[in-house]
Image (cartoon, rainbow, N blue to C red):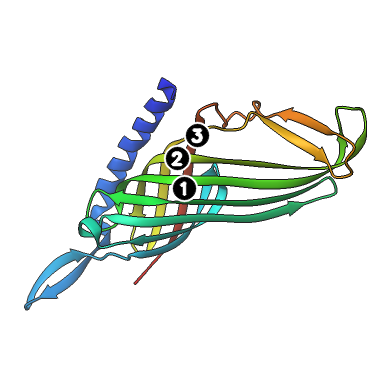
Amino acid sequence: MKPTKMIIYFLIAFVLLGIQKQINAQDIAPSVTNGNAGYEESNKPLRIGLKVGLPSVYSINLEYVTPLLDQRVAFALDYLPIGYSNEDLSLKLRNFEIGSNVYLNDTGKGLYGAISYFKFNTSADVNDVDFDNGTFGPGETSLKFGTFNVKLGAKLGRTFYFRIEVGYGFGKLPSELVITSTEGIGTTTEPIEDISVLGKSGLPVFNFGFGIGFL
C-alpha cells in the first residue's frame, strides 16, 4: 500500500475516534436495578442497512452481534443484486461479502476492526463489438475475482445508526477483459488497467451506510 494511502487511513481513524467520544453519551438509556437508578448501554444486536462505496457500489448489509467476547464479535454479510440494460449493454452484478466485525467495547457500537472475504461477480452482454479479426457483432463477457479485506470501521448510533469503513482488499485481480462473440465469429481483449481503483495486489475499500437496529 502506498504511504499516502496509509496516512489518509490513519487520519480518518483519528477523526472517527473523536466523533465517537463526542457521542458516547447519546445512546445511554436509564435503567433501574434493585431499586437504584443507574445507566446501561442498550445493544441492538440485529442490524439491517444499506452501504454505498467501493468496491460494491452499493449493497444490502446484515449484521448480528454475538455473545462472544462480551458482545464484541459480530457476524456481517453484504449482498449486491443489480441489473442494468440499455440499447448497447446488459449488465448483471451478483457480489457478496462475508466476515466478522470485532468492536472495541461491549455495546456493539463505536470503533471496530473487521476481516472479510469479498467476491466480485459480473457478466455482461454487449452489442456491436469490434472483434480482433475485423468482424462486428454481439458479444458476452464476465469479470470475477475475490479479495481478503482488512478494515477499520465505526458504527455511530443505536436504533438508527450511521456506519463508515476504510481498508484494503488483498487479492490477485484480472488484468484484461475478454469479450467473446455470441455468434462464434471472434474475440477481443480489453485491458482493465485504466480502472484506477484496481491494482495488481488488490483494491482500496471505502464505504459508508446507515440502517436500523432491532431486538
Q: Which residue is mark 2?
A: 148
Give the residue drawn at x 54%, y 42%: 55
Left or right of 120 on screen, residue 7: left
Helix, strand or loop status at disc 1: strand
Which residue sits at x=81%, y=50%? 86
Q: Position of residue 128 (x, y in %)?
A: 88, 39
Residue 200 % position (x, y): 54, 26
* Image coords of residue 192 (percent x, y): 67, 29
Q: Residues within 10 Å of mark 2 (few under 14, many from 20)?
A: some
Q: How many marks?
A: 3
Q: Closest to the observer: 21 or 191? A: 191
Q: For the residue marked with disc 2, what is the amino acid? A: Phe
- Which label is found at residue 171? 3
> Which residue bears the numbered disc 1?
208
The quarter of the picture where residue 8 lies is top left
Which mark is in front, 2 or 1? 2
Element carrying mark 3 = loop
Q: CA distance from mark 2 to mark 1?
A: 19 Å
Badge 2 vs badge 3, beta-carbon distance below 8 Å: yes
Rounded to the nearest angstrom, the CA distance separating label 2 from label 3 is: 6 Å
The quadrant of the image that shows the N terminus is top left
| Structural crowding at the residue carrying mark 1, measured as other residues with C-alpha within 10 Å and reported as few (<14), some (14–19) or many (≥20) | some
Image quadrant where residue 35 sits: bottom left
Q: Residue lying farthest right?
A: 135
Packing grade of label 3 (10 A; few <14, some 14-19, many >=20) is some
Frontmost residue, 176 versus 21: 176
Give residue 185's position: percent from left, percent from top: 90, 37
